Amino acid sequence: MADNSFDIVSKIDLQEVSNAIQQATKEIQTRFDLKDTKSEIKLEKDAIELHSSDEYKLKAVTDILQGKLVKRNVPLKGLTYGTIESAAGATVRQKITMQQGIPGEKAKEIVRVIKDSKKKAQASIQGDTVRVSSKDRDTLQEIIALIKNKDFGIDVQFTNYRSN
């Protein structure tokens, strides 16, 4: 029976996203080049919606938001940018979806990498997390290093580290 385990997750702290959006909104309202451009940022349940008067201003709003997110340690890998589409009143909008949880195919890829490493550890997919368990703590540390060094295209965090 494996005594030690940890979870691999991909989550974005929504409170930090909300704070970053508030800071970005303040900056948009005070910046000279963005005044009177109808630029705004809205936080929805699992997405961020950007509105602006044209694509160049929307790009500036995106840059401001990304800067604020980075300052608040929100991983940009967890954001998926939609296409820029025209909206009512000669404005444009863009939807940014936030990654919450590891998608199924990425979870399978993580499990495959762990199994291919030939380390004595078991990896199992549990919903939108991957649980890794082993008898040896050092093996778990090696697996964490292995996963950190490999790019899966998503941001991963290691939580729920348990050892007995």
Image (cartoon, rainbow, N blue to C red):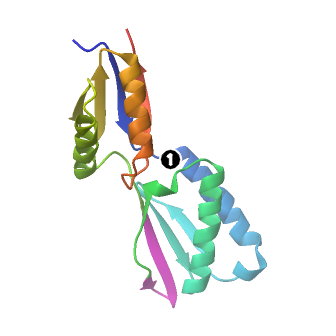
Over which residues does the magenta segment extend? Answer: 85-96
**Residue, x 29% and y 30% (percent of image)?**
131
The residue wearing badge 1 is: 14
User: In the picture shown, does residue 104 fall above or below 47?
Assistant: above
Find residue 10 and report its image quarter.
top left
Q: Give the residue type that dot 1 points to.
A: Leu
Question: Which quadrant is the C terminus positioned in?
Answer: top left
**Residue, x 51% and y 91% (percent of image)?**
90
Q: Position of residue 150 (x, y in %)?
A: 39, 47
Examine the residues drawn in magenta and state their main secondary structure. Answer: strand
Q: 117 or 31: which is nearer to us?
A: 117
Left/right placement of residue 75 relative to residue 38 reads left
Find residue 86 and report its image quarter.
bottom left
Any part of residue 35 in sight? no
Q: Position of residue 106 (x, y in %)?
A: 28, 50
Q: Position of residue 117 (x, y in %)?
A: 28, 36
Q: 47 or 60: which is nearer to us?
A: 60
Mark 1 surroundings within 10 Å by alpha-carbon count, few (fewer than 14), some (14 through 19), many (20 or more): some
Left/right placement of residue 125 relative to residue 10 reads left
| Residue at the extreme front | 118
